[in-house]
Image (cartoon, rainbow, N blue to C red):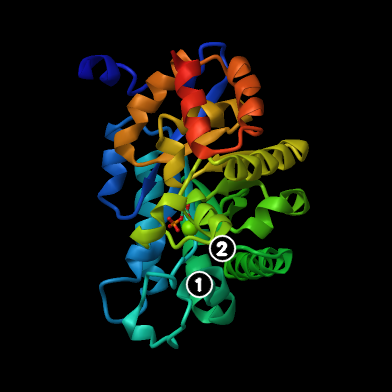
Amino acid sequence: FKAELTKLKDQPTFSKDGKQVELAANIGKLEDVQRALDNGAEGIGLFRTEFLYMGRSSLPTEEEQYTSYKYVLEKMNGKPVVIRTLDIGGDKELPYMDLPKESNPFLGQRALRLCLDRQDIFRTQLRALLRASSHGNLKIMFPMIAVIEELLEAKKLLAEEQAKLADEGIAVADRIEVGMMVEIPSAAVSADLFAPEVDFFSIGTNDLIQYTMAADRMNETVSYLYQPWHPSILRLINMVIKAAKQEGKWVGMCGEMAGDTTAIPLLLGLGLDEFSMSAGAILQARQLVGELEQAEWAAYAEQALRIRSYEQVTAFVQQKRK
Ligand code: PEP
Ligand code: MG
C-alpha cells in the first residue's frame, strides 16, 4: 500500500480523464524543503517566511533572507517556488517590534497592511527576494489583500526595488510571476477586478473561511462553523477560479482545504490548477486525483454549489465517490 504510493513520487499529476494539476507543498522552514521533495512535491505553493522573523530578537537582514530564499530555490532546482511576503500580526507576534496591542488582531494591522506601513521592513524583504530570483523559479505572493490599492502599492514598491537593483547591476530573473492570496471575502467576490493585475491567485482558505463565517480559526467553541466545503465557501472559490480563467491566469490553493480528500474532488471539478498542502498529504492526493474524472466532477461541483448545508455536501461527495 505504502509502496504503491511511493511509486507516484516522481510522477506528474493527472486526473483519470487527463487534466493535469500541480501538487505542491507548504513549507515554513528550510528543513521542510527536503521533506517536500521526498514526498513528491512538484513545487512549493506556499513558503511562509515568518520563521525568518520569529524566535529572535531583531529583524533579519537582507543578506540572511537572501541566503534562505536562494537555498530553497536552488534545492527545488527549477520547480516553481511561491514565496509569500511577511504575514505577521494576527496570532503571530514579534516582541522586538513593539507593535501596538490590538483588540481584534485578526482584523488589525496584519501582513501586507503592516508591510505597507513599515516600508523599510518590506523593501528589505523584496530586495532579498529579487536577488534570490536568479537562482530558480521564484513567484512572489502578497498576503491579506482586501482592496486593489494594496496590490498596486505592493507592486509599485516591488518595481522600485527592481529598478534600484538594475541600477546597481545586480542580477534579477527576467520574469518573476507576482500573485496574491485570496483570503479575504472582499477579494474573492471582486476577483475579476484583481485578475488583470496578477499572474496568479492562491486561495487561502484558512483565513477565507474564518472571515466568511466570522468564526475565529483558533476558537474551539465556534469551530463547528469552520466548514471548508460549505456552499458559501465553494461559491467564493468558484468565483475566484472563474475570474482567473477569464483572464488566462492560473489559480492555486494553499489553505489546509487543498489537501483534504473530501475537498479535492470538488476543487478539481471547479478547475483548480494547483493544490498546495502539507508534504505528507501529497502522494495520497496524487493517487486520488488519478481516480477522478475531472469532467464528471465539474458537473458534481456545479451541483454542490446549490446544496444548502455542509453536512449534505459531505454526504453528496461520499455518495459520488462510491
Ligand atoms: C490561509 O490563510 O489559508 C493561509 C494559507 O495562510 P496562513 O494559514 O498562513 O494564514
Ligand atoms: Mg492566511
The residue shown at (58%, 56%) is 212
Image-quarter location of ligand 1: bottom left
Q: Which residue is mark 1?
A: 110
What is the quadrant of residue 151 in the picture? Answer: bottom right
Q: Can residue 96 be seen? A: yes
> For the residues marked 2 and 1, what is the alpha-carbon distance in whole angstroms?
8 Å
Q: Is residue 266 left or right of residue 224?
A: right
- Residue 196, relative to residue 287: is it above or below? below
Secondary structure found at label 2: loop
* Residue 43 shows in this picture: no
The residue labelled by disc 2 is 144
Instruction: Pick the residue in front: 80 or 223.
Output: 223
Are dots 2 and 1 in contact, CB under 8 Å?
Answer: yes
In depth, the one of 252 and 237 nearer the eye is 237
Which SS class for mark 1? loop
Q: Is mark 2 within 8 Å of ligand 2?
A: yes
Could you say where residue 97 lies in the image, as x and y percent from the top left?
39, 84
* Left or right of residue 272: residue 88: left
Figure quadrant of the C terminus: top left
